[in-house]
Amino acid sequence: MPTTDTDRVIIFDTTLRDGEQSPGCSMNLNEKLEMAHALKELGVDVIEAGFPIASPGDFESVQAIAREVHGPIICALARCNATDIDRAALAVKDAPRPRVHVFLATSAIHREFKLKMSREDILKRTIEGVTRARDQIADVEFSPEDASRTELDFLTEVVERAIEAGATTLNIPDTVGYAVPSHYADIIRHLKKTVRGIDKCIISVHCHNDLGLAVGNSLAALREGARQVECTINGIGERAGNTALEEVVMALHTRQDFYGLTTGINTRFLYPCSRKLSHVTGMQVQRNKAIVGQNAFAHEAGIHQDGMLKNPNTYEIMRPEAVGISRTELVLGKHSGRHALRQKINDLGYHLSEEQLNRVFDAFKILADRKKDIYDADIEALAENQLHNISQKTWTLHAFTCNAGTGTMPSAAVALWRQDGEIMKDAAIGDGPIDAVFNVIDRITGITVKVCDYRVRAVTVGTDAQGEAFVEAEFEGKKLTARAVSTDIVEASAMAYLEIINRAAARQVRDRLKPTDNIPQESVPMA
């Protein structure tokens, strides 16, 4: 049976049960085990591993997690009937700390239309279900489904009967996301004042996000004495999802001065756990998602970036390292200021005079109006242009042809314009037509880079759609990226790769020059 200090909040994770019910988030046995181990590492107190009666596969997953993942309480969900409860108890019986979670709808609309049961029927079924579960597993949680829409007098009665039957945790679910914080807090407050024996149990909350209030409702309930929050990684779950674990945990962590509550979560694993779930389910996190979204610790506005560079507390109430993100990202875009651009250029190893920086800043603003994403390689290219007055590319694609097919060796022939006006030609083979084209470009230019990532995608529709090629490569320890668009994806790939080669060539020129050969030195006052 779980116990908690008055200021300790139990984190009950239902990613593997309610979260998996989110469309497109189904997981197989190995994926569930992988996530369960990640949740243990994160420090969750309870893992709701599944709904064993739902399918043989779900039963096997819950049983495997119960046997292999030690530390957290392993919980199985069951409807309030003998078959479900027996199946759930069997699934978790091998866990060092097993729990059965029994639920039964109590609201008028559910009683009338879903269950077709009277109040008396509900009370009787509650007592029978909790008693049966308690006879098999000592730790029993009971949930009156749709509690937030249940009449308070009846909810009070149901909860009392569950306690009398042996429930150790009482969960008050906002099943359809109907509650608002003050309403939900009133429910918890009422139950604490009126339910006999409730001081012997842990009050839990389970909120859905249909109105975007799941986290707010959960926090309001904690202020009224609830001490278990049921939540999911990334807030996945039925419909609009569940309370997001990372959000409620960091709210308590960041505003400890207000809530006075703690959790056992190792917050540095929040971001890795979020990414692992995205990888397992294929459901990506929205960019502006709180705590773990790509933009959560990113700043583009110039005034924000200036403040961040002076003192991170000006615009960040949490440090990215606290949730497992390596550092704050100052995203360069059309809203960025000169201060952030100077910092980025310095971080990339360039030393520009004020005059050069001003010219780079002007060119950067023009580029930012044209491009959605500004990469380090774009900034490097602008800096290189100023350092070496590069107005033309060293190499330009003149023509190419390639040959590939079943039973043939992929090959390509390429002609490049060199900056001095000469056309250079060569041919090579490769694993495929793209590889062959890249190999020819390497041969002609004498520059070899290591391709780390290569992707193509359609940027328009139809059979004549334009294709965008993205290439990321490493040259002398630096990552270079380039994109190009063409109706011919081989041509787009060649153009993108050649852009990287040009940047590598510019870097070679820079490295051959001494700083005094090219970089105007600002006057330094004498001591």
Image: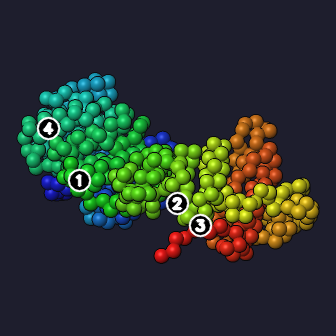
Q: Which residue is mark 2?
A: 343
**Circle nearer the N terminus (4, 1):** 4
Disc 1 or disc 3, which is closer to the eye? 3
Q: Amino acid at mark 2?
A: Gln
Tell me where residue 505 sits by quadrant. bottom right
Disc 4 versus disc 3: distance between alpha carbons?
68 Å
User: x, y (%) of residue 303?
Assistant: 45, 47
Disc 2 or disc 1, which is closer to the eye? 2
Q: Nearer the viewer, residue 230 or 452?
A: 452
User: x, y (%) of residue 21?
Assistant: 42, 43
Q: Nearer the viewer, residue 223 or 127?
A: 223
Q: Which residue is mark 4?
A: 189
Q: Amino acid at mark 3?
A: Glu
Q: Is residue 183 above or below residue 65?
A: above
Disc 2 versus disc 4: distance between alpha carbons?
52 Å
Disc 2 or disc 4, which is closer to the eye? 2
Looking at the image, residue 372 sits to the left or right of residue 502; the answer is left
User: x, y (%) of residue 140?
Assistant: 21, 50
Q: Which residue is mark 3?
A: 522
Q: Quadrant of the N terminus?
A: bottom left
Give the structural element (helix, strand or loop) at label 1: helix
Q: Residue at x 82, y 61 (%)?
A: 395
Disc 1 versus disc 3: distance between alpha carbons?
49 Å
